[in-house]
Image (spheres, rainbow, N blue to C red):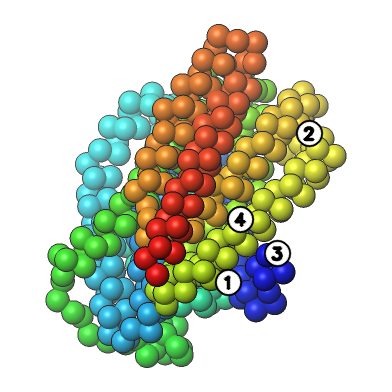
Amino acid sequence: MVQSLFTKEKTSKMMIVFLPILITQLGLFAISFFDTFMSGKFSPVDLAGVAIGTSLWLPIYNGCSGILLAVTPIVAQLFGQRTKPQYIREAVMQSIYLALIMSAILIVLGFAFLNSMLDFMNLEQEVKRIALEYLIALSFGIIPLFVYTVLRCFIDALGRTSVSMFITIVALPVNIAANYAFIYGKFGLPAFGGVGAGIASSITYWIIMIIAILITAYVHPFSQYGLLRSLPRPSLKEWSNTMKIGLPIGMAIFFETSIFAAVTLFMSSYDTITIASHQAALNFASFLYMVPLSFSMALTILVGQEVGANHFKRAREYSLMGIFFAVGFSCISAIILVLFRDQVAYLYTNEHDVAILTAKFLIFAIFFQLSDALQAPIQGALRGYKDVNVTFFMTLLSYWIIGLPAGYVLANFTSFGAFGYWIGLIAGLAMGATGLSLRLLIVQRRMKASN
């Protein structure tokens, strides 16, 4: 069984799709890191303003862009069916229209309610100003960012993930250079401080969109689909098809990303050392999550293509392979964390007390990322089958109905203290992974029976 599962052909195809996605995700992680890091070097107030702005923007962005991730399984299945190029073109172009509408709605809502939201947070006046202006600057890049998201999903769905990797590799130095220029006031520009990070991000988003447009227009095999050569009539039916798949994906991602903002808010009652240690451990756990997330995205592509071609046995084999690789990596990283958690903690701080507590939080991060290694690739496989509703409900259940309430009880009514929030989330995530595993088995058996 193992020998037939890990054939050279399937393993090679998995790695060809997975590795560029991983490099792309690490590049996007690095862009976010440099925004925060370079703003912090300007001043602590600018760091705080950018941190507040980012904490508001990321859950909303992840939720909205999650809707557009529906393009990947839609195009992957059409590609697997070897359908005519015009059908894929129609699906992608209608998704671009949807991206433009979502961008416009988000910008209008932001300008209507953003100031009131920041007032409600009772921030220092200068921190509020920086957060507000940072988000306003960022808003000029929402349209190109969402259009690029659709184009990236189209590119990836064809299995050409190395192209998205190339775009990200180009974007990273552009973003760093723009941050340097606008944050610190170089090359004759005024020093905008943290607001400059928003300007730099918007410029970067426009550049990556333009690069993606040029690639899809002039580079084979993308050029054969004729994207943007003419504008088809808007189709409410196509928008509805995308939303049926995308909305549950977007909501699931929103629930997943916003839970950490909620935990951070609850932990604000603890001392500075505890909060700093929690954030450091959470940042490293987010870094490790890039691997199972990348396997998840790879499985959406590979499973979607095989399902579209009615190769249900191969789709099942790719699902098992992706889960095996993700869990295997997590076991290796868990061993490394057990042995070197103190050294990892000191990467984030020179303060002894913070490092000691961070090392303790990293023990819980081990169990957290082991559960992630199971649930993330399963989510990706289910998306490849276009089965997304159960994932949405399981994410809501595992994080918000089980994880957060259990964490609150453990943190406030037991001796676990701040660690209780991590234990609660781990328990919820483990239950979610179990539920998703059962769902994947049901979907695969249903597909097998229908074949």
Secondary structure state at the residue bearing disc 1 = helix
* Badge 1 or badge 2: first in the primary sequence: 1
Residue visible at 44% across and 48% down? Answer: 439
Instruction: Report the Cα–Cα distance between label 4 and label 1.
Output: 15 Å
The residue that disc 1 covers is 17
Report how far apart the C-alphas of labels 1 and 3 lie in the structure: 21 Å
Residue 449 visible, this angle: yes
Mark 3, residues whose alpha carbon is within 10 Å: few (<14), some, or many (≥20)?
A: few
Q: Foreground mark, 1 or 2?
A: 1
Q: Are marks 3 and 2 in contact (CB under 8 Å)?
A: no
The numbered mark, 1 or 3, whose residue comes first in the sequence reads 3
Residue located at (22% from left, 41% from top): 112
* Residue 177 point in image, percent of width and height: 58, 64
Disc 4 secondary structure class: helix
Please state which amino acid type lies under the numbered disc 3.
Val
Residue on which the image places disc 3:
2
Q: Is residue 103 above or below residue 92?
A: above
Q: Amino acid at mark 2?
A: Asn
Name which of mark 4 and mark 1 comes first in the sequence. Answer: 1
Nearer-N-terminus badge (2/4)? 4
Residue beneath the point at 31% across and 87% down: 84
- Going from the N terminus, do you reach mark 3 or mark 2 first? 3
Location of mark 4 (residue): 323
User: Label 4 amino acid?
Assistant: Ile
Q: Residue at x 30, y 39 (%)?
A: 114
Q: Nearer the viewer, mark 3 or mark 2?
A: 3
The span from disc 3 to disc 4 (Cα, nearest Å) is: 13 Å
Please tell me whether residue 205 is drawn above or below residue 262 in the rendered image. below
Residue furthest right in the image: 339
The mark found on residue 350 in the picture is: 2
Q: Quadrant of residue 366?
A: top right
